Amino acid sequence: MRSLVLKKDEDRRIRAGHLWVFSNEVDTKKTPLTDFAPGEEATLLDARGKALGSLCVNPASLICGRLHSKRPGIPLDESLLRERLAAALAAREQYFSEPWYRLCHGEGDYLPGLVIDRYGAHLTLQLGTAAMEARRELIVRALEELVHPASLRFDSDIPARGLEGLSRLPESSGPVPEFLEVPENGCRFTVAAAQGQKTGWFYDQRANRREFARYAKGADVLDIFSYVGGFGVTAAAHGARSVTFLDASEPALALSRRNMAANAPGVPVETMLGDAFQRLGELAEAGRRFSLISLDPPAFIKRRKDAAQGVAAYRKINLLAAGLLAPGGVLATSSCSHHLDGAELGRSIAHASAKLGRPARLLYTGAQGPDHPVHVAMPETAYLKCRIVRFD
């Protein structure tokens, strides 16, 4: 195993536990990145030659190295993959009694670049790095031994693969079902296996949807960026009076209607197709009001350089949503952008409160669920924020 050498003083973050090495931190005079093949293993050294651990290298990526061990000379081989996946599985089985969860969450499970969602007998995988792509067969063998999946789908249409120079064409193994059924919080959701967003379902919001339902009894609910209805359907099943879904995808709205019929058949349902900013403005002009609103947008800040524009978008959408609340109404607002911290989300809520002249009280602070573990030395892995607020 060859070595990759860091520049002077570029080892501090790694010593603190972080797993990423950036290309501008490497001493390319001593160890040119171009000498490494994508996915190749190496021992990471500081500028004095002291070993910091083992990593996989991709010279084509800004994040040119991702550590998988704090010990030198450790290959990312089938044995280590099986060991880490077995540990991830054991952790999930402590939390959940049924096999519907995120089975592997990249750095949070010490397998950088690997995401696996489990839907009973089906698995959806994201191989986000050249290292994981090169070990595809080893990963599949380990999963077949551990969980015996009936089918696997590789969700390759993710930006990370583009940054790593990998193909974004989807692949599958076994008879992948057209639809999957996900049990959660007393409901059963139908999601599209191949055509859905991301890996099909957002397990990370499970606990926040359960908390949202606490305020559902007798409520008129608006579910913004609803996807297949996770928040709205859960509220309906827990006593909501009506639910309106707003999303830019008609197939997603069709599944929202299907999930409402399956879980809360007597509750009136309305779907709205279109851009959320525009449709929320139309609802305000029409004088519509809701007593319970979920706002769960996609990441408005995908890159740090887009932070200012993204913060403005979060403030605008939160103001629009809060403006539709009836007196005493409750807003659950979320952000899945790791570039927006919890304090900034709080400022978006405070901005809406001040603009509307309505005092607001924080009722709940939530994050991603335990099947999306946070690596304590990597704030990037703590991406999901949820705040539930009452506007008086």
Image (cartoon, rainbow, N blue to C red):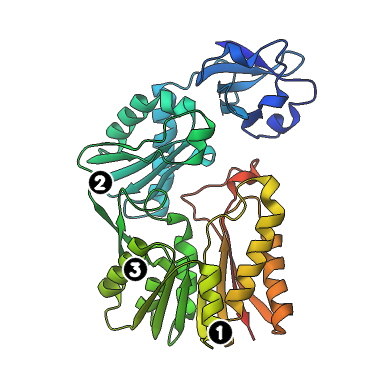
Residue 111 visible in the picture: no
Q: Earlier in the sequence, mark 2 or mark 3?
A: 2
Q: Where is residue 255 in the image (x, y as percent from the top left)?
A: 31, 65
Q: Which amino acid does label 3 sit on?
A: Ser
Comparing 250 with 214, the one in front is 250
Residue at 33% in and 25% down? 137
Q: In which quarter of the image is the N terminus?
A: top right
Dot 3: element: helix
Q: Where is residue 158 in the image (x, y as percent from the top left)?
A: 46, 41
Q: How far apart are marks 3 and 1 (CA)?
A: 25 Å
The reply, left or right, for residue 117 in relation to residue 224 is: left
Mark linked to residue 121: 2
Marker count (numbered): 3
The reply, left or right, for residue 225 in relation to residue 27 is: left
Q: Where is residue 347 in the image (x, y as percent from the top left)?
A: 72, 67
Indicate whether 225 appears above or below 392: above
Q: What residue is pinned by disc 3?
A: 256
Q: What residue type is labelled 1?
A: Glu
Residue 254 visible in the picture: yes
Instruction: Give the label, 2 or 1, closer to the camera.
Output: 1
Mark linked to residue 294: none
Q: What residue is pinned by disc 1?
A: 285
Residue at 77% in and 14% down? 48
Q: Distance between the residues labelled 2 and 1?
A: 47 Å
Mark 2 closeness class: few <14, some 14–19, many ≥20 residues within 10 Å = few
Q: Which of marks 2 and 1 is nearer the N terminus?
A: 2
Q: Distance between the residues labelled 2 and 3?
A: 23 Å
Comparing 218 with 280, the one in front is 280
Residue at 44% in and 33% down? 84
Comparing 95 with 133, the one in front is 133
Instruction: Give the label, 3 or 1, closer to the camera.
Output: 1
Residue at 39% in and 67% down? 229
